[in-house]
Amino acid sequence: MTELPPEIGKLTNLQTLTLDGNPLILPPPGIVSQGMTAVLSYLKELLEAGTQRYEAKLLILGDGGEGKTCLSRAIRGLPFADQHSTMGVDIEPWEFPHPKNPEDPGKTVTLNVWDFEGQEINHQSHQ
């Protein structure tokens, strides 16, 4: 699961929400790490404000050992030395300020970076 529907924010009697192991994009990982109350508040605010989201997907494809994971990490400002081969697909959200409103913390762009495994046997999944 990558997204929680904002309507979950309406569940006022919810007592437990376990999200471990899900590559969540919505809500952002920073909110999820704060716990269930923060997640519910975030989702409720999305519903109330009718927040407009700016989101895109970047697919990184190529042969094995060509540096796709290093590229993914470099554009997100992360160290990229000594990376292991990707197994399957790694999906990492990258949030940054909206280029036309960099001062407004509410206006962010989420770029979901899909780093595909490069071994030839898996090229069928790249179509």
Image (tube, rainbow, N blue to C red):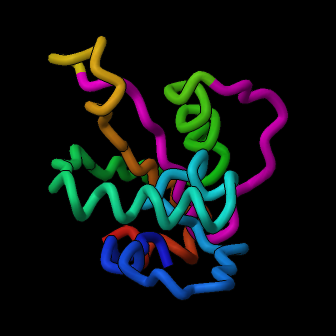
Residue 101 placement: quadrant: top left
Relative to 96, is 92 on the left or the right? right
Does the stretch in magenta take in 80? Answer: yes
Q: Please give the count of numbered marks on the rendered protein.
A: 0
Residues in magenta?
78-98
Residue in the foreground of this view, choosing between 84 and 98:
98
62 w.r.t. 24: above or below: above
Image point (49%, 67%), residue name: 40
Percent of width and height locating residue 104: 28, 20
Residue 66 placement: quadrant: top right
Residue in the foreground of this view, choosing between 101 and 59:
101
Does the stretch in magenta take in 31? Answer: no
Image point (32%, 55%), residue name: 45
Q: Residue furthest front?
A: 13
Image point (62%, 43%), residue name: 69
20 w.r.t. 38: above or below: below
Percent of width and height locating residue 61: 43, 53
Residue in the foreground of this view, choosing between 44 and 22:
44
Image point (41%, 71%), residue name: 3
- Quadrant for the C terminus in the image: bottom left
Residue in the foreground of this view, choosing between 14 and 26:
14
Relative to 21, is 25 on the left or the right? left
Q: Residue furthest right?
A: 82
Percent of width and height locating residue 99: 22, 18
16 w.r.t. 36: above or below: below
Relative to 58, is 119 on the left or the right? right
